[in-house]
Image (spheres, coloured by chain):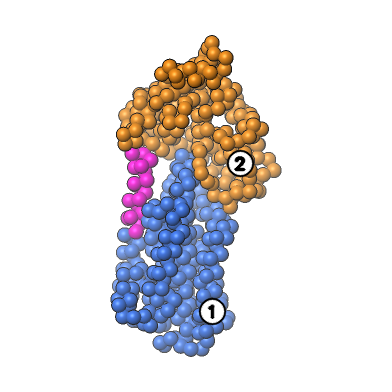
Amino acid sequence: MHDLPARFTRVTKNYGPVEALRGLDLTLGRGELVALLGANGAGKTTAVRALLGLAKPTSGEVRVFGADPRDASSRTRLGAVLQIARVPETLRVREHIDMFSSYYPNPMPMHEVIEAAGLQGLERRKYGELSGGQQKRVLFALGICGNPELLVLDEPTVGLDVESRRALWKQIRAFVARGKSVLLTTHYLAEAESLANRVVVIHRGVVIKEGTPAQIKGEAATLEDAFIDLLEAS
Amino acid sequence: MRTYLLETKYEFLKALRMPQYSLPTMLFPVVFYVFFGVIFGGAKSAKDVTVAQYMLATYGAFGVIGASLFGFGVSVAIERGQGWLEVKRTTPMPIAAYFVAKLAMAMAFSAIIVLLLFTVGTMFGDVTLTIVQGAVLFATLVAGSITFCALGLALGFLLGPNSAVPIVNLIYLPMSVLSGLWVPIWLMPKPLQELAYWLPAYHFSQLALHVTGGSRGESIAMHVLAMLGTAIVFAAIAYAGYRRDEGKLYG
């Protein structure tokens, strides 16, 4: 229990008058892929930032493997793919990976990272020359290159075409198959349904429902219908 | 250690491959120097030295300041504003590596610019420096980069990613002119000469001119103190900016 990959205990986070999180409780076990679902403004990104040590909870506690996410030792076990405006464009794919790998004590070998992120043949390309889907795969590569036990993906497939999205799903599944944990935020319900062992629906900063995709879906025809019903009910 | 080296190497490559950074920072001082120092300067002398030798010091200072302000200031403003710094902060990278690498990169660019100017000056201009003078001038110019990196870093934490380039230019160019980097300081109106004492670029160029000849003969200690003081003040402002960012993110 103590060293769960991720644990939120009654976490609140206020930005001025805005209550982004209002008592979030959430755990993530080993080998689990949890999808955090919520409308825009539900608190998904704030939860991710708190988990990565980028935002300090106003109250409550966030733990990564039982420790403060801001500790360097916690960060060596964490990988992240954030929504980011721009990445330095003049470095090549392998140079970016080489640099990030050097931050970690036991990085994955370069060829494994390239393969796991589906970047074969693109190693020498500059980031700025890649397509949107390829760029996302580079960010994924940077997230996994340190051989983390917990990977946090903040809307990793937003803006990707179907093919690129499917390719990234495959890579995320392969990562979990190695016994690692993933916390994924998304607002593509099909993505949650396809990837997650467990879905956690948050609304206005608290969990309103959690369970397997099938449990969440319940009687509704699709996960999307169930999601809409939930939001309307709360 | 490996992180620091790699970070520096890639910081350098990243900047070198950005023509909007590497071309103007390297070419402007060299082109200006060729034009004003070598072609028009000819064998004329300014005070007790040739124009080419005088301007080797002042355009050297100009080049170093540009490499430092843009390499450090603008790149921090952009990477910070676009979330790249934040991505790095989710990793175990020691934050110092990020800044040390940028400082090393700016100093490397400064060194390249100064060497280019040396080459042009000694091959085509009337520059006569002993090896020791050359080495001292080189060391003075490259070390001066630290002060302007501190200024750049402070700007990097105060400016947004879009406003950084124009605002840094608005500081860089007037400061260079008013410090006598383009037109010798003694040719400026008296009030402007007084104003120059408040500009770090003035003290920087006077230090370099102490080596080449043509300085106004003021106290070296005063110039060094001004450079150090500027570095400390702006490093403190940068640190406050960093803490403010941290508070915003982590408050």
Question: Which residue lies under the disc numbered 2?
Answer: A132
- Tint of chain B: blue
Tell me where residue B41 appears, x and y as whole percent: 50, 84
Side (left or right) of A22 relative to A217: left
- Tint of chain A: orange
Q: Secondary structure at mark 1?
A: helix
Side (left or right) of B121 relative to B149: right
Q: Main secondary structure of the magenta part?
A: helix
Tell me where residue B95 appears, x and y as whole percent: 43, 47
Label 2 resides on the chain identified as: A
Pointer 1 local density, CA inside 10 Å: few below 14, some 14–19, many at least 20 = few
The C terminus of chain A appears in which quarter of the rendering? top left
> Residue at position x 51%, y 65% from top?
B25
> Residue at position x 46%, y 59% from top?
B165
Tell me where residue A68 appears, x and y as whole percent: 39, 32
Q: Is residue A2 above or below residue B19?
A: above
**Residue B240 among those drawn in magenta:** yes
Give whichever of B213, A171 is nearer the camera.
A171
> Residue at position x 42%, y 52% from top?
B160
The N terminus of chain A appears in which quarter of the rendering? top left
Magenta residues (range): B234-251
Side (left or right) of A220 relative to B61: right
Pointer 2 local density, CA inside 10 Å: few below 14, some 14–19, many at least 20 = some
Side (left or right) of A203 relative to A177: left
Label 1 resides on the chain identified as: B
Q: Is residue B111 above or below residue A204?
A: below
